[in-house]
Amino acid sequence: MSRPTKHSPERGSARIRLLEAARDVIRSNGFAATSVDDLCRAADVTKGAFFHHFGSKEALGVAVAEFWTETNTGFFEAAPYHDPADPLARVLAYVAFRRAIITGGIAEFTCLVGTMAQEVYASSPDIRDACGRSIFGHAATLEADIEAARRDHGVSGGWTAESLARHTQAVIQGAFVLAKAGNDADLARESLDHLSRYIRHLFHVTEEDDA
């Protein structure tokens, strides 16, 4: 979801350093290709410290998905897309914000829980479910603004605030996949631009109406 900073092994507890290392290394290498030794080396902790805090690599996978959710909740709560008075403007500002944080290397802006969910959805139900709680929980934060925008604009049809909120995440996660497949962040930005146009179309507004 967000674009958190790199971990700093010299600060914090061994558990936090391992979670920060997992956040970064898994986004770069994938879950299966990341070994316990890789994580210990990145976090500058011993293997004994790893197993003191996590009973297995799978337990670490669940914990890092939850850590991702916890650390990103505050990031998004403080983001400027909440500022506009108009609810539709807030929804569009959210999409613009997600586009604006597509910066740096691909591993830096892509989503940890999206990455893990794609990889382990069949092999590790516990990690999959932790990733699902993160993704669907974040989508739910958009529902109130979408519903208020529906009321304000008199929009009805065969969709709900919940379904559009989920669709925003489908586009964002798909955008990350395209960026990885094409090794090009602009592919992700392009998808977010189309999402913005799609939302405007649903609400019968144009970019000129924003002025």
Image (spheres, rainbow, N blue to C red):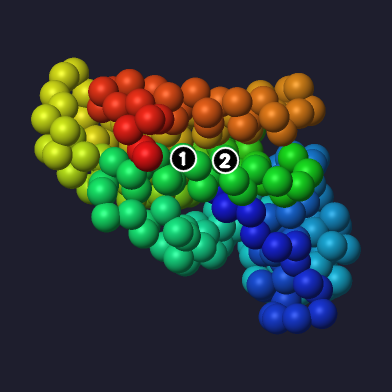
Asked if residue 119 is positioned above or below residue 44 in the image, the reply reads above
| Element marked by disc 1 | helix
Residue 121 seen: no
Horizontal relation, residue 136 to residue 28: left or right: left
| Element marked by disc 2 | helix
Horizontal and vertical percent position of residue 187: 67, 25
Which amino acid type is marked by label 2? Arg
Horizontal relation, residue 188 to residue 185: left or right: left
Horizontal and vertical percent position of residue 205: 30, 27
The residue identified by callout 2 is 99
Q: Quadrant of the C terminus?
A: top left
**Tag 1: Cα neighbours inside 10 Å, few (<14), some, or many (≥20)?**
some
Q: Nearer the viewer, residue 113 or 62?
A: 113
The residue identified by callout 1 is 95
Q: Which mark is residue 43?
A: none
Q: Residue at x 14, y 39 (%)?
A: 152
Horizontal and vertical percent position of residue 182: 76, 22
| Residue 200 quadrant | top left
Horizontal relation, residue 120 to residue 162: left or right: right
Which amino acid type is marked by label 1? Val
**Tag 2: Cα neighbours inside 10 Å, few (<14), some, or many (≥20)?**
some
Horizontal and vertical percent position of residue 66: 51, 58
Q: Residue at x 38, y 30 (%)?
A: 208
Q: Nearer the viewer, residue 144 or 207?
A: 207
Asked if residue 74 is positioned above or below residue 93 in the image, the reply reads below
Give the Cα distance between marks 1 and 2.
6 Å
